[in-house]
Structure formats: structure tokens, C-alpha cells
Image (spheres, rainbow, N blue to C red):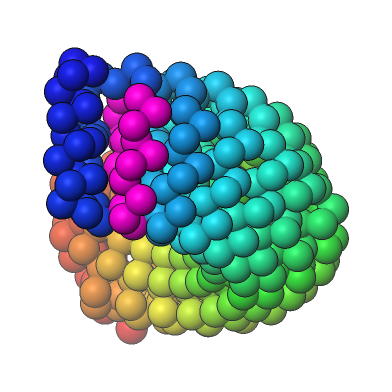
Amino acid sequence: MTNEELLQIIEKAAREKATRLDLSYNQLSSLPPEISQLSNLTWLSLYNNQLSSLPPEISQLSNLISLRLDHNRLSSLSPEISQLSNLISLDLSYNQLSNLPPEISQLSNLTKLALNNNQLSSLPSEICQLSKLTELYLSNNQLSSLPPEFNQLSKLTTLALNHNQLSSLPSEFSQLSNLTELYLSNNQLSSLPPEFSQLSKLTTLALNHNQLSSLPSEFSQLSNLTELYLSNNQLSSLPPEFSQLSNLTELYLSNNQLSSLPSEFSQLSNLTELYLSNNQLSSLPPEFSQLSNLTELYLSNNQLSSLPPEICQLSNLTELYLSNNPQLSSPPPEIVEQGTEAILTYLRARLEAKG
């Protein structure tokens, strides 16, 4: 879009007292000062352009509630943006931001802030003054720590920090007591503070691709969890208390070092999907058959020598993966190759013979 065409659009929108303006996908490399004429705008999308900066005049769009600036080339944020005090949603993801101005704290009505896919190595403590934030997206940056004041963001329900360089979490983190979704995958976490268990409203927790070798027994207090991602860590065992996560429906434990599962594991009766591939499991407890809601069970690449025939009692099971268990004799390889139905038929016959 040429500058002339853009000016015509702005003039028309100003004349019509437009409240919404979509300028996405226009290869804009700059905005003219005339943007200030759009004082009635409540919603502005500049998604997917080539903006490397914003004009100071943007501060005059005082009625803006939602501003999309994602997928541009912004390397810094002009302090003027802080004058948009009515903003509720600000999307700055997929830019080249390496820092944020302290003035960001003045966006006091923000409930959603997206900063994922930038180059942030730290956050200003002022970001913690955004006390109305409920959603904060910081994935794919270079954060190695969080400001101690982070616990002031007490209204957060969704926090995404995956693909950063976090090696620990401040114990104050546990005060984010309204969190329901927390994404911490692809970091360098080697342990979780016991206080972590105070995040009792969590329903989704992603910790895959870290360096966790154990889970605190208090972990079991996260009783509202429905989805738990722990794949690609260094877990060699699970605490018996793990079975208290009674609302879990999806559990990802692939690519760890688990050699056994606690017999209490069978109490996770709501599980529908269970991923245990690429571990060192040599057996499954017979009680495993009590996981009556399982539809998918992944056990490839383990050390299993046999499956308890009771597995055939999992009446909802439609996907059972057992490949690359070199010591597996029951069911034998030729049955495993035929897939889920053949395996369950074989186990049924074994169970009948046993009975």
C-alpha cells in the first residue's frame, strides 16, 4: 500500500468517525502523523506489516481498547505508547523487542499482553504493576529470570513462558494463585519449589523439555490439573502421592528415565491419554487395568517383557503402541505388529486361560 492510499484510508476513517480499522498485511514500513486523527478508534490492527517504529502521534488514539502490532519489525517501544491508558489488549508478539520501557506500567487497564517471539532477556520490574493482567504471553524469548515482584500479577490466569532460559522459579511465584494455565516447557528447570503446589487452580501445566529429575511430593496438591506435560525430562520415579491428581485426563511422560510406576498410579481413573514411550519400564502393575477411561496408551521404546493380560479390560482403549520393546514376549512381536485390536484379542485369550 502506498503512503497516498494509506492517507486516503485514514481520512475516510476519520470522516466516518470509525471505531475499527484493519491495516493488516499491507507491507507498511511506517505510519504517518495523520494517524492521530483517528481519535474514535477502539480497535486497530497493524498485524503483519514491516513497521520498525511507531510515530509519537499514536499516543493520541486515547480511546483504543485493542491494538495489534504482532508480526512487525519493532526493535523498541516508544514511551508514547504508555499514554494509551484505555488499552485492554496489546499484542506485540513476533517483533524484535530486546527491552520494554518502564512506562509500560502506565497501561493500567491491560488484561492481555502478548510479547512472545521477541528478544527479551529481562523484564522491567514495572511490568509487575499491571495489576489487571489476566493473560501474559512471554514464550520464545531469552529470559533467564523473572523480577521478584512478579507475584504482584495476582490476577493472572494464563502465563506462557515456554522456550526461555529459566533455570529456577522464585518461591514468590506460588502467589499467582489464580493461574489456570502455566506453560514452562523448553527451559532449564532442574527442580520446582515446594511452594509450587499452592497453584491450586491450575488445570494445564506444561513442563516438558526441562531438566527435572524429581517432583516434590507436594506436587499432588495440584488437584485440579487435567493436562500435565512432563515429557523430555530426567524423571526416574514418580512420588506415590502423584495418584492424587485425580482429575488428570492427559498425562505426558515420554522421554524420561522411569523404570517403574507406583501401584497407586491406577487411581488416575479419569485418564484418557497416557504417554510413556521412551522410558525404561520393565513392567506395568496389574492394577493398570483400572484406568478404565484410557483411549490412548503409548508404551513404545521401553524394556517391557510382558503386559498384564488385565489390560484387555480397558474397554475404551483404541490406540495401544508397543513397538521397540525388544524383550517383549507376551504379546509376541508378530501380534504387536498387527496393531491394537490384535493385541487386545491376544490378551483376552491369556486372561481367559488364566481364569
For the stretch drawn in magenta, the main secondary structure is loop
The residue located at (34%, 17%) in the rendering is 29
Observer-nearest of 91 and 56: 56
Of 219 and 85, nearer the camera is 85
Residue drawn at (54%, 79%) of the image: 224
- In this picture, residue 102 sits left or right of residue 304: right
Q: Is residue 94 above or below residue 339?
A: above
Q: Is residue 164 visible?
A: no
Identify the magenta region: 31-50
Task: Tell me where residue 50 sits by quadrant.
Answer: top left
Q: Is residue 46 magenta?
A: yes
Give x and y (percent) for residue 324.
39, 37
Of the pair 38 and 177, the residue shown nearer to us = 38
Left/right placement of residue 267 relative to residue 240 reads: left
Residue at horizontal 57 percent and vertical 49 percent from the top: 83
Where is residue 300, by image quadrant?
Answer: top left
Position in image of residue 319 (x %, y %): 25, 57
Instruction: Relative to 86, say whether 22 is above or below.
Output: above
